[in-house]
Image (cartoon, grey):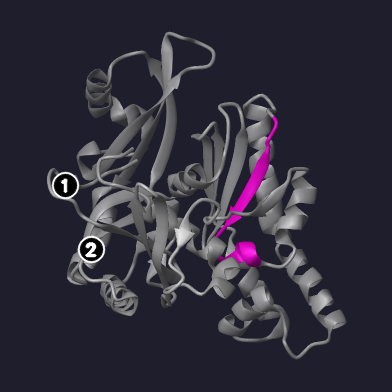
Amino acid sequence: MLDLKEIISGKKRLVGLDIGSSSLKLAEVISSSKGHQLNRFVEVPLPQGVIIDGILADAGALSLKIKDIFKLAKCGRKGIVTCLAGNSVIIKKVTLEQMDETELRELIKDEAGKYLPFDNMEDVNYDFQILGENNYNPNQMDIVIVAAKKEIVNSFLEAATAAGQNVDIMDVAPFVLETLYEANYEFDNEEIVVIINIGASTTGINVVKGGTSVFTRDFAIAGNTITESLKEKYQITFEEAEKLKIEGNPDASPEENLDLKNSILDLAQPLCMEIERSIDYFRSTYGAEDIKLVLLAGGSAKIPNLAKHLSGMLNVKTEIIDPFLKINYNKRNIDAKNLDNIKPVAATAIGLGLREIGDK
């Protein structure tokens, strides 16, 4: 994962800050010998147009919202762990001859242009992680290279600094939920799980085998696609459509709400079909290995019956990710009655909050 800053000395508490295109989510995770506990979780809406396809378009507006969320959370100056997503980051899996990490770093520095679509690597932040020995050739190893343009990275760093905070770790969105999965779920080295994050503007897919990512893909059909379709169909505002998408119509009869839920699933079909195509591609490319489970995260994962619908399409058990299987929560700060509601929304922020300086 992409660590842009490293703190050499001193213990520092970090908070996860999920910067999405529709909202900011802050999660403070306290870790001790007894395990992990979510101490605080706060979400604030972000105006449309501040983040577009993972690119920061309005730094001033983001800085103000970062100030707001830290004030609401009653969380003083902390180190921030956040992540890049969508078109702002490139993730490339490559296979190279076996070598030590020092040699590999020099090779990537000299030849990164062969693997990454950038004209000038001086303008790029990049890092890598060794995944292990290649399955088909023991003399080779698989690695994942992660890269982003410095101007994109710096825009987020500067917005946080202007808000009086510092970004200490910049992670990469597909790997954040992998961290959360590892902290909560039991798995063996051969188990394959698909983690799907349905955000407002981007859907991210990460296929994990034995706790290690083997396939990632992002596409721009996501929650807002469904909300816009509802807005047009019922001639309502975007905010009304967003609420209708998840909560239904409180004034409608049970029969009318059932029809509404089915209509929303119809509008979600382009998203579901793109997920199905991505998983079919993985199956055809990686030997059609069995998938044990599909986990859904993100606000639109809460669409009624979406998990059940996808399960039928994919022929794989599909459910909403649960950040609280092994992570406790502070009952004074977090309402137990709201726990199910925040599970998919808070998942990325909690995954970020689990990161520590110096880990991979």
Report the quarter where the N terminus lies: top left
State the residue at coordinates (20%, 54%): 12
State the residue at coordinates (23%, 28%): 109
Indicate left or right for 137 with 125 as reference.
right
Which amino acid lies under the numbered mark 1 shown in the image of this protein? Ile
Mark on residue 78?
Answer: 2
Report the quarter where the C terminus lies: top left
Frontmost residue, 222 versus 347: 347
Indicate left or right for 145 with 189 as reference.
left
Which amino acid lies under the numbered mark 2 shown in the image of this protein? Lys
How many tags in the picture? 2
- Find the magenta span and give its range: 290-302
Q: Residue furthest bottom?
A: 251
Against 22, residue 101 (above or below) is above
Where disc 2 sits, the SS reads loop
What x and y, as percent, mark residue 339?
56, 68
What x and y, as percent, mark residue 68?
31, 79
Mark on residue 147?
Answer: none
Q: Is residue 200 visible?
A: no
Residue ID for mark 1: 7
Q: Does the magenta portion include 99? A: no
Frontmost residue, 341 versus 205: 341
What x and y, as percent, mark residue 76?
22, 71
**C-alpha gap between disc 2 and disc 1:** 13 Å
Q: Residue 42's image quarter?
A: bottom left
State the residue at coordinates (24%, 49%): 150
Q: Residue furthest front?
A: 34
Against 84, residue 289 (above or below) is above
Label 1: few (<14), some (14–19) or many (≥20) C-alpha neighbours in 10 Å: few
Where disc 1 sits, the SS reads loop
Which badge, 2 or 1, comes first in the chain's sequence? 1
